[in-house]
Image (tube, rainbow, N blue to C red):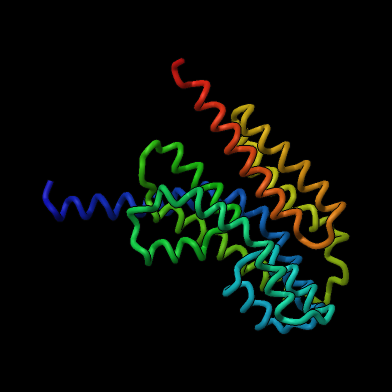
Amino acid sequence: MTGEDSNTATTADNRHQFWLALVKTWPLALGAIPFGLAYGIIAIQAGLTVAETMLMSLVVFAGASQFMAVVMIQSGAGIPLIVASTFLINLRHLVMGLSISPYLTESTSWWQRVLAFGMTDESYVTSVTHYREQEEEQGNPYFMLGSGGTIYVVWAIASLVGALAGHAITDPLKWGLDFAMPAAFLTMLLPQIVSRRIAAVVVVSAVVATASYVLIPGKWYIILAVVAATSTGVVLETLAEKRAQPC
């Protein structure tokens, strides 16, 4: 195969991976639409303009953090408190980034930055599942680009529609929009439970998150659930490796 043929094959594979990601991510992207609509509505009702609402979606691109930010803006909270609170919510991205990074070690730093910006819960689950199924050491960055890009476009459009309808809908939550994201997260989570060890991690994190939400003010339940899940996973993985070692 000549160099030109090799480049053509690589380009075709990159294009295939990009569109394959769109197909695989689309069902989860549909689940983000109600959430984006609700964000746009609440942002307008909190006093943001359509331009400010869209700027946040295009630059911040973090659903839960955007919700918290607009609610805190409406309540008159200061910028340092808003930044600290949204930082805590998004700290889970550190764990997700560490999890998927082994598949992208050969990608350039430019690629890694772009993919990090576009990484959401939906694109992470779709991409890491795809890379694992491929059973290759390195994943094609075009797949994660296609996955993150799909969510980005859908989120932006949903935010815009919600912002334009902001004053026409007084209470978006009465439409059940607050249930959309928990349902989407369950859709992402359940297929990942493929062993008793993973099920144990899920149960521990769920119990810790629920107890922390009830007992501790603020968003600490997210951090505590991540720590509990990570610790449980490490312990169970270590025990499994010890059992697998010959006596």
Residue 246: image location, x then y, percent:
44, 17
Quadrant location of the N terminus in the rendered image? top left
Residue lying at 51% horizontally and 25% vertically, measured from the top left: 242
Is residue 132 shown left or right of residue 16? right
Is residue 16 shown left or right of residue 64? left
Residue 51: image location, x then y, percent:
65, 83
Residue sitting farthest toward the front? 247
Is residue 214 shown left or right of residue 8? right
Q: How many marks?
A: 0
Residue lying at 76% horizontally and 82% vertically, measured from the top left: 78
In terms of image quadrants, where is residue 161?
Answer: bottom right
Residue lying at 62% horizontally and 56% vertically, measured from the top left: 92
Q: Which residue is nearer to you in this view: 111 or 211?
A: 211
Residue 133: image location, x then y, percent:
45, 36
Above or below, 231 relative to 19: above
Residue 91: image location, x then y, percent:
62, 60
Residue sitting farthest toward the left? 2
Above or below, 166 relative to 88: below
Residue lying at 74% horizontally and 50% vertically, measured from the top left: 182
In terms of image quadrants, where is residue 77?
Answer: bottom right
Residue sitting farthest toward the top? 247
